[in-house]
Image (cartoon, grey):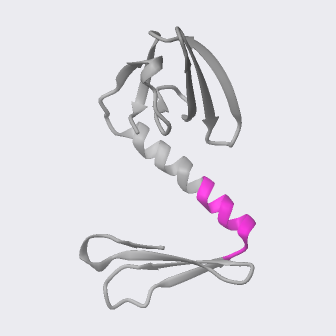
């Protein structure tokens, strides 16, 4: 995978035999700096990046929204002190089952009345 940002800055992510390589460039002609890590360390890095992104989002003012439970979508993020992302929504008449996943990977299902307002920090 490759990401290009403004001014030729970017990053490349590649997998090898049992390792992951992340190369970051600060300019178009820059060969970049490469970080090589095991799959376990790559998962730790990904989790740390998710936590940092959540912290950065919480630090900036955002316009929060509320939606009825029946309107939740996969990827919606709950407005709370902990990151909770919608994984699955199942509407059953006047009841909605929502499966949430925390940033630590924990998953659980809650049941709501279909019209219950749910506060969101980020809309998918």
Residue 88 placement (x, y as % from top left): 58, 33
Single out the residue that lies furthest toward the left. Answer: 7
Identify whether 36 is placed above or below 114: below
Q: Main secondary structure of the magenta part?
A: helix
Residue 28 placement (x, y as % from top left): 31, 86
Single out the residue that lies furthest toward the front. Answer: 93
> Is residue 11 part of the magenta span, yes or no?
no
> What range is drawn magenta here?
37-47
Q: Image point 72% across, 83% down: which residue?
A: 17
Q: Does residue 67 appear to the left or right of 7 in the view shown? A: right
Location of residue 16 (image quadrant): bottom right
Identify whether 122 is placed above or below 118: below
> Would you say residue 89 is visible in this rendering?
yes
> Is residue 43 part of the magenta span, yes or no?
yes
Q: Image point 67% across, 59% down: which residue?
A: 44
Residue 34 placement (x, y as % from top left): 55, 83
Identify whether 95 is placed above or below 48: above
Location of residue 36 (image quadrant): bottom right
Q: How many marks?
A: 0
């Amino acid at each position: 995978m490759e990401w290009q940002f403004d001014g030729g800055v970017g990053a490349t992510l590649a997998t090898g035999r049992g390792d992951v390589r992340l190369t970051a460039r600060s300019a178009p002609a820059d060969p970049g700096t490469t970080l090589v890590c095991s799959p376990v360390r790559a998962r730790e890095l990904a989790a740390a990046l998710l936590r940092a992104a959540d912290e950065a989002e919480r630090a900036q003012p955002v316009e929060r929204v509320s939606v009825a439970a029946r309107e939740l979508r996969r990827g919606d993020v709950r407005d709370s002190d902990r990151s909770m992302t919608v994984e699955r929504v199942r509407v059953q008449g006047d009841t909605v089952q929502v499966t949430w996943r925390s940033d630590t990977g924990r998953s659980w299902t809650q049941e709501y009345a279909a019209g219950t307002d749910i506060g969101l920090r980020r809309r998918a």
